[in-house]
């Protein structure tokens, strides 16, 4: 992450576009409702109860959202553990997505906490509960969010070091007579900021590998622990999902969702920004997905057969139908990528990524919400305010991503990117690649 700056570029274009203002509207609505929630209490804006203390803020924003944010983790496994450096141009975009996903998951927990004013106790070691799986998840998520920000710092420092500070200089001209009495002092200050950024960049490069190792270790811990948490639910969780393999299933689940998110996000951003598709790298990632998803399915069905729960599927009740939908989405998305021809199609890469994200996310939703039954007399359906707050949080992620890729070098540099893949790309696609590296197929 530290060097290889020429692999990335700032996405050209205006920040203040129509999608920006649409997303900003949903962000403001969500933030207003969050402010009301802290003023009036969690019961005033949610359908939560003693039977269902966790709703969509935990099921989606935390359990599912952190899996969608595992693109950086999944790519790090591929690049730094398996030594596949050809995927390195995709890592900054994946890490930026992970930064928003994890930071907003932590924020969602704060919104969900009934007695949020006691949250300061988390930072007091004397109050730590070392044998609590929830404590481990909270500690790892907070630590991983910090690690992700540090891993993204090289892009920020590079920008500060090489920035011409055009917008600051223009602002200073406008403010000169009002607030800034000495433009020479401002110019010297900006020069010092650039020098400091370059100085810090050199030192960060020397220790970045330590944070990369942490960035691989921490998700392995807390993603499995997210599964461990629901083992505690015991018989309240349907036998279709309640198993001692939950930690392993959650860990493998986050890996194939991470790769799927990279495929989905890369194709979508390339389409939105009118960039060439990174088909060469994505097809390599897509080749791994069926094996990881297949391993997950083998463990899933092996466990159901071992526990004699196959007849439960054949009841075709609500839980069985959601189970079948989950399996169909994951199986369909993975099966699609078994074909080499399909892996070279941006459209099918996008569709496969979307299906796997939906199926993998539904699995987590099933475990945390749909398959959970606290007993007679309890029911839960999210309130409109809960939906809008979740939509607002998703809007923050998208808005932040669209803004930061236009400020910092995050997107793969097509000049460097396609120059390196060159002949290999032509050989693999055998005449199916248009000039500039864009696949010509459907």
Image (cartoon, rainbow, N blue to C red):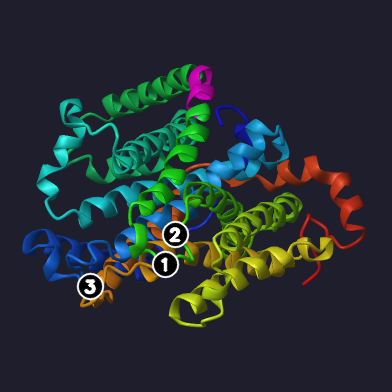
Q: Quadrant of the N terminus?
A: top right
Residue occupying the point 25% across, 70% down = 386
- Identify the residue under disc 1: 238
In the rendered image, the vertical position of residue 375 relative to residue 404, given as above or below: below
Q: Which mark is residue 242?
A: 2
What is the distance, in whole Å, between disc 3 and disc 1 at their CAs?
28 Å
Can residue 17 be seen? no
Q: Quadrant of residue 140?
A: top left
Label 1 sits on a secondary structure element that is loop
Q: Which residues are magenta?
A: 205-211
Q: Nearer the viewer, residue 112 or 429?
A: 112
For residue 208: magenta?
yes
Q: Is residue 411 left or right of residue 169?
A: right
Q: Is residue 94 above or below residue 239?
A: above
Counting from the top left corner in percent of width and height, residue 336 is at 73, 67
Which residue matches tag 3?
A: 385
**Mark 3 or mark 1: which comes first in sequence?**
1
Image vertical order of residue 342 relative to residue 222, above or below:
below
Drawn side of residue 423 relative to residue 211, left or right: right
Distance, label 2 to label 3, CA atoms, is 30 Å
* Residue 9, position as x, y percentages in the image: 58, 43
Please indicate whether residue 342 sits to the left or right of residue 318 in the image.
Answer: right
């Amino acid at each position: 992450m530290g060097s290889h700056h020429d692999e990335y570029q700032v996405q050209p274009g205006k920040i203040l576009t129509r999608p920006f203002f649409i997303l900003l509207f949903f962000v403001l609505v969500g933030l207003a409702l969050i402010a009301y929630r802290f003023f009036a209490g969690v019961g005033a804006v949610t359908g939560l109860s003693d039977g269902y203390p966790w709703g969509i803020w935990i099921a989606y924003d935390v359990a599912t959202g952190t899996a969608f944010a595992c693109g950086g983790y999944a790519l790090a496994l591929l690049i730094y553990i398996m030594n596949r450096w050809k995927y390195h141009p995709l890592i900054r975009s994946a890490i930026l997505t992970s930064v928003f996903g994890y930071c907003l998951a932590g924020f969602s927990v704060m919104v969900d906490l009934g007695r949020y004013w006691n949250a300061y106790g988390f930072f007091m070691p004397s109050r730590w509960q070392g044998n609590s799986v929830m404590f481990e998840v909270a500690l790892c998520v907070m630590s991983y969010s910090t690690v992700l920000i540090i891993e993204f710092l090289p892009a920020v420092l590079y920008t500060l070091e090489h920035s011409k500070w055009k917008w600051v200089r223009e602002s200073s001209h406008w403010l000169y007579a009002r607030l800034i009495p000495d433009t020479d002092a401002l110019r010297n200050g900006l020069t010092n900021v650039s020098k400091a950024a370059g100085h810090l960049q050199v030192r960060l490069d020397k220790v970045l590998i330590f944070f990369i190792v942490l960035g691989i270790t921490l998700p392995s811990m807390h993603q499995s622990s997210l599964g461990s948490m629901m083992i505690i639910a015991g018989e309240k969780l349907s036998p279709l999902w309640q198993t001692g393999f939950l930690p392993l299933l959650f860990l493998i689940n986050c890996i194939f969702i991470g790769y799927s998110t990279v495929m989905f996000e890369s194709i979508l951003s390339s389409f939105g920004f009118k960039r060439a598709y990174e088909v060469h790298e994505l097809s390599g990632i897509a080749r791994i997905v069926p094996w990881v998803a297949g391993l997950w399915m083998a463990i899933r069905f092996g466990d159901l057969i071992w526990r004699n729960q196959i007849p439960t599927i054949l009841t075709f009740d609500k839980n069985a139908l959601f189970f079948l939908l989950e399996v169909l989405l994951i199986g369909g998305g993975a099966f699609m990528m078994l074909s080499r021809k399909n892996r070279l199609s941006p459209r099918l890469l996008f569709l496969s990524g979307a299906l796997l994200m939906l199926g993998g996310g539904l699995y987590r939703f099933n475990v945390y919400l749909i398959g959970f039954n606290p007993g007679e007399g309890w029911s839960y359906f999210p309130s409109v305010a809960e939906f809008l707050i979740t939509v607002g949080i998703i809007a923050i992620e998208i808005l932040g991503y669209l803004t930061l890729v236009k400020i910092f070098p995050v997107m793969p540099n097509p000049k460097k990117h396609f120059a390196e893949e060159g002949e290999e790309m032509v050989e693999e696609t055998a005449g199916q690649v248009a000039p500039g590296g864009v696949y010509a197929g459907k």
